[in-house]
Image (spheres, helix red, strand yellow):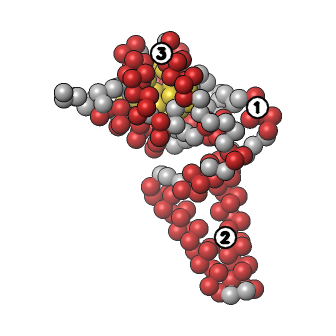
Amino acid sequence: MTVSRTPVVVLGVGQARSRLHDLTVIDVRTPGEYASGHVPGALNIPLDQVRRALPELRHAAERGDVLMVCASGNRSLTACELLAGEGIAAATLAGGTTAWAAEGNDVDRPAANAARGGWAMERQVRFTAGALVLVGLALGLFVHPAFQILSAGVAGGLVLSALTDTCTMGVLLGRLPYNRPRAADLEATLAALRSR
């Protein structure tokens, strides 16, 4: 069986906002990132679980338009390309939830996460990177100059992160227990997709 590849559509924030009530929005970030704030009505299917959700995503796409969302648009584009390879049409949100929030749109936050007062992932990355640079410089100054390699490594990682629009430090921080308030309830999400 040959599956025709469907093109990936990119929606701007304004376009997505005006059509939000007609879209099935899927957030492909980790559960911790999703809990820190997501597009209203978005369902969470982490990128590594998208293949498992193909039948339900196909069903959703047959019933209407599907919008994939992540923090910056990179992971959601990967998800759209995966779906396109399976013949499932989906759009991605240009700039992701970062652009969505930057334009003043509301984001939903689960009550448990809001009460916890957790930091957004971007803030955690900035803090961790800054702290590692300072530690590397201090150890390099007071213990041994070779410790400055730590600061250089963090700087190199930040440059690579900007060039590739990925963030390894964010992925690693996302695996920490306080960033994983709960596992993605994939079965509930798939049931919600089936009932739409």
Q: For residue 133, which numbered disc appears in the image?
A: 2
Q: What's the amino acid at mark 3?
A: Arg
Residue shown at 68% from the left, 83% from the top: 140
Q: Give neighbour class at mark 2: few <14, some 14-19, many 20+ (Cα, 10 Å).
A: some
Residue shown at 63% from the left, 80% from the top: 148
Q: Secondary structure at mark 1?
A: helix
N-terminal of the two: label 1 or label 3? Answer: 1
Residue shown at 29% from the left, 27% from the top: 87
Q: Secondary structure at mark 3?
A: helix
Horizontal side of residue 100 vs 19, given as left or right: right
Q: 156 or 171: which is nearer to us?
A: 171
Q: Secondary structure at mark 2?
A: helix
Q: For residue 112, which numbered disc appears in the image?
A: 1
Horizontal side of residue 55 vs 93, given as left or right: left
Tell me whether circle 1 and circle 3 mark residues in contact (CB < 8 Å). no
Q: Whole-Å distance between the Cαs marked 1 and 3? A: 26 Å
